[in-house]
Image (spheres, rainbow, N blue to C red):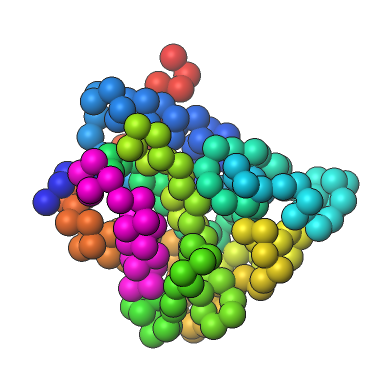
Amino acid sequence: MKRVIHLELGHTDYARAHALQHELHRMRCQGEIGNVVITVEHNPVFTIGRRGSRANILVSEDERKRAGITVYEIERGGDITYHGPGQLVCYPIIDLRDYGRDIKWYIATLEQAMIDLCADYGVEATRRAQYPGVWIGNRKIASIGVSVRHWVTMHGLAFNVDVNEQHFAMINPCGLPIEMISLADLVSDDLPMGRVTEGLLKHMKSIFSWDIVDREASKYLRRLDD
């Protein structure tokens, strides 16, 4: 099993988490640290990937600002997506040379972890070959967008636990005219974020053959302030 450090950031501003990803990516590329996985909830943001366009924001700038949503243009693949409270975001920073340098396998494995997570709650989820992410029928419950440099990953997945779907309605998610859905729309269970996070990590541990070790994120975040 491969040892992986888990950093739980809780509610963290997107810009700060993004800066932390870059610092950890640099450290991983230089061999200063091993593989890391971050879990986090963000304040409301739209992020636009390399193939994205602001044309997929369907509301005026004033309306977006009134909703308290910030826009970031970033280096991951894919188009536009939303992050916000009630959404579990996971950023693996891992060296794919440990996994055959296979990006397609990596994306499919992230999808499988979320499909298995849905199954824990009695929900049947699927993938679509041309559209990365996880689907419940024609509605999307999770998105994937990654960046890989020097075979080390950044960005990752976003799983809707109980999000504000009105915010998603302000965009074409992933550049598509689709409807998003949350796990809370499908089950009557209480869904504390900590428990859902544990479930996702359980499946990632199994599929990737990880030995996950929890660490305090504070010492890594302090590096951003030095």
Q: Is residue 25 above or below residue 210?
A: above
Residue 213 colored magenta?
no
Q: Where does the image place residue 73, in percent across and percent down from the top left?
A: 64, 38
Classify the position of the C terminus by image quarter: top left
User: Which residue appears at 23% of the width and 25% of the height?
Assistant: 31
Q: Is 204 on the left-hand or right-hand side of 63?
A: left
Q: Is residue 4 above or below residue 197?
A: above
Residue 112 colored magenta?
yes
Instruction: Tell how many labels.
Output: 0
Q: Which residues are magenta?
A: 97-116
Q: Is residue 36 visible?
A: no
Q: Where does the image place residue 57, in percent across and percent down from the top left?
A: 77, 53
Q: Where does the image place residue 80, in percent across and percent down from the top left?
A: 65, 52
Q: Is residue 100 above or below residue 139?
A: above
The one nearer the camera, 203 or 9, is 203
Considering every residue shown, the one lying at the far top of the view is 226
The one nearer the camera, 18 or 76, is 76
The one nearer the camera, 190 or 63, is 63
User: Which residue appears at 16% of the width and 51% of the height?
Assistant: 211
Residue 147 location, quadrant: top left
User: Which residue appears at 60% of the width and 42% of the height?
Assistant: 50
Q: Is residue 91 visible?
A: yes
Residue 176 location, quadrant: bottom right
Q: Where does the image place residue 132, in percent across and percent down from the top left?
A: 49, 62
Considering every residue shown, the one lying at the far left of the view is 1
User: Which residue appears at 17% of the width and 44% of the height?
Assistant: 3
Q: Is 122 on the left-hand or right-hand side of 46?
A: left
Q: Is residue 190 above or below residue 95?
A: below
Q: Main secondary structure of the magenta part?
A: helix
